Image (cartoon, rainbow, N blue to C red):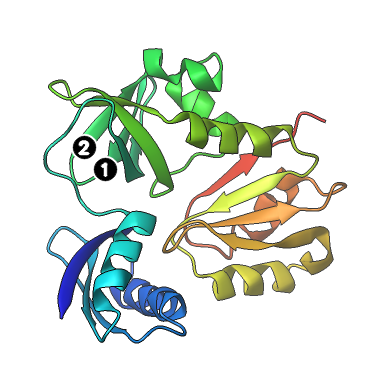
Amino acid sequence: MVTVTLLLNVYGNKERALHSAEVLIDNELKELDASAKLSISDDNWIIADISGEDSEFVSNFLMQKYGTPVKKLIKNETYIGVIRQIHQREMVVDIGNLITIPQKNLAILGSGTAEQIATRFGIIRHLPVKIEITDEKARQGTFTKEQADIWWNWKKSEQDRVIANSVTRSELKAAIKKTGHSRDIYGIERLGLMEHMITCRENTDGPGIVAAIGRLVKGELGVIRTEK
């Protein structure tokens, strides 16, 4: 058996989050000789006890895809983390250590305060991200070019997008269906354990979707307006 801690952040209803993690990991293990028993660590990450002939391969694959909490920081190294806090002049990313992304390191995402940039790109708490350490002693970093490119590609596309946290895909789908907007979106994409993205159709207004489903979704909602 191999035990790994994954950077899948558990918050809100832990039972619901654990079930979502089980569905997610079971899907990753299809066609592999491995099974995983999941639990939640004291600091609210997912722990996977993996058994089976492919356990070593699976553990490495899962850590590479989802990340694992990091204690020792290395300058210029890239890490997977989750947005923990958004302040006026900085964002805080949790990689097992809390890393500050100061406003000076956000220029890759354009002008404005950290809060304005977060609003522009629909960045909300718990969203999985990739960062690079710029100063290990000060625990500071920046978003990777790969991460910034993803956000810019969404921003420059022809479709508005809505980012949601603290919700399952089925709950989000039900909210969209209940408000009569099923035909106004292309689909729902999983971004993290309880984080998803709704891609709107070209003639659908993202803020309109937020206004419609906001009362039915318990988590936060962010919007990426296109530049069309």
Residue bearing the label numbered 2:
98
Q: Which of the 4 quarters of the picture holds residue 225?
A: top right
Q: Is residue 14 left or right of residue 144?
A: left
Q: Decide: few, some or many residues near mark 2? Use Cα within 10 Å; few <14, some 14-19, many ≥20.
A: some
In this view, 138 is above or below 15: above
Q: In this view, does 67 lie to the left or right of 172?
A: left
Q: Is mark 2 on a helix, strand or loop?
A: strand
Q: Which of the 4 quarters of the picture holds residue 19?
A: bottom left
Q: What amino acid is at disc 2?
A: Leu
Q: Decide: few, some or many residues near mark 1? Use Cα within 10 Å; few <14, some 14-19, many ≥20.
A: many
* Percent coordinates x, y for residue 132 in the rendering: 33, 30
Residue at 32% across, 45% down: 81
Q: What element carries label 1?
A: strand
Q: Nearer the viewer, residue 208 or 9?
A: 9
* Percent coordinates x, y for residue 54 in the rendering: 30, 80
Residue at 46% across, 83% down: 30
Tell me if residue 137 can be seen. Answer: yes
Residue at 18% across, 45% down: 70
Cβ atoms under marks 2 and 1 closer than 8 Å? yes
User: Which numbered circle lies on residue 94?
Assistant: 1
Q: What amino acid is at disc 1?
A: Asp
Q: Which of 81 and 10 is in front in this view?
A: 81
